[in-house]
Image: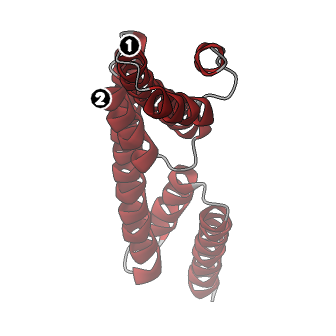
Amino acid sequence: LSGQARLVAIQAEKDSLYNVSVSRGDSLFTAEDYEPARTAYQSALQVKPDESYPQEQISEINKIIRELELAQIEQERLDRNYQNAIRLADQQFEVKNFTQSKANYEKAFNLKPEENYPKERIAVIDSIIKQKELDKNYRTIVLAADGFFKTEAYQEARKKYEDALFLKPDESYPSDQINK
């Protein structure tokens, strides 16, 4: 009986060690603490190498860790591409290449839509482009008005100066011409 009792005691000890290791592994796994969980499951396998549950959990942990590593690599690539697009856009903005700058800010925005900086810069560029277009149209109209004025086509000149004032109401030049 003493040999039999000793075998039962050894088996009970193994069962206890196994259960403690699996329980520890399960709680670490639930807490997403994967490396220590894997170690706990490996300890359970040392006690009972024929059990499938610890090996299944180790395989699942290995899969999760690979996915996390791939996700981290992808995030680093995304961050790098975003930073490159922002750097290039900022450089192009500084040299007033607004079209290319906007395209790179849009690229950065598409990479990270949650970021405010590209949106803000795109709005600034849109405002600059709109103002440049307004200035160009204004100059064109004023030049036409000046041409009419020089040829003494005063009605046409007045109309063009009024058109110019409509575009830029705060400008004094068309007002001065109209009042002549």
Q: Is residue 51 visible?
A: no
Q: Is residue 169 left or right of residue 72?
A: right
Relative height, residue 8 to residue 83 (above, below): below
Quadrant containing the C terminus in the rendered view: top right
Q: Residue at x 39, y 34 (%)?
A: 102
Front one among 87 and 138: 138
Front one among 13 and 96: 96
Q: Nearer the viewer, mark 2 or mark 1?
A: 1
Q: Mark 2: which secondary structure?
A: helix
Q: Give residue 134's position: percent from left, percent from top.
A: 48, 31
Q: Residue at x 42, y 11 (%)?
A: 94
Q: Is residue 108 left or right of residue 30?
A: left
- Residue 150 image label: 1
Which kind of residue does numbered mark 2 sit on?
Gln
Query: What is the CA distance from the residue labelled 2 to the residue labelled 1?
Result: 41 Å
Q: Farthest residue in the top direction?
A: 95
Q: How is the image coloured?
A: secondary structure
Front one among 113 and 148: 148
Q: Residue at x 38, y 19 (%)?
A: 143
Front one among 106 and 7: 106
Q: Give residue 72's position: percent from left, percent from top.
A: 41, 45
Q: Give residue 178's position: percent from left, percent from top.
A: 61, 22
Q: Farthest residue in the front direction?
A: 152
Q: Is residue 122 visible?
A: yes
Q: Earlier in the sequence, mark 2 or mark 1?
A: 2
- Residue 83 image label: none
Q: Residues within 10 Å of mark 1 (few under 14, many from 20)?
A: few
The image quadrant that residue 26 belongs to is bottom right
The image quadrant that residue 83 belongs to is top left
Q: Give residue 135's position: percent from left, percent from top.
A: 47, 24
- The residue tagged 2 is 100
Which kind of residue does numbered mark 1 sit on?
Lys
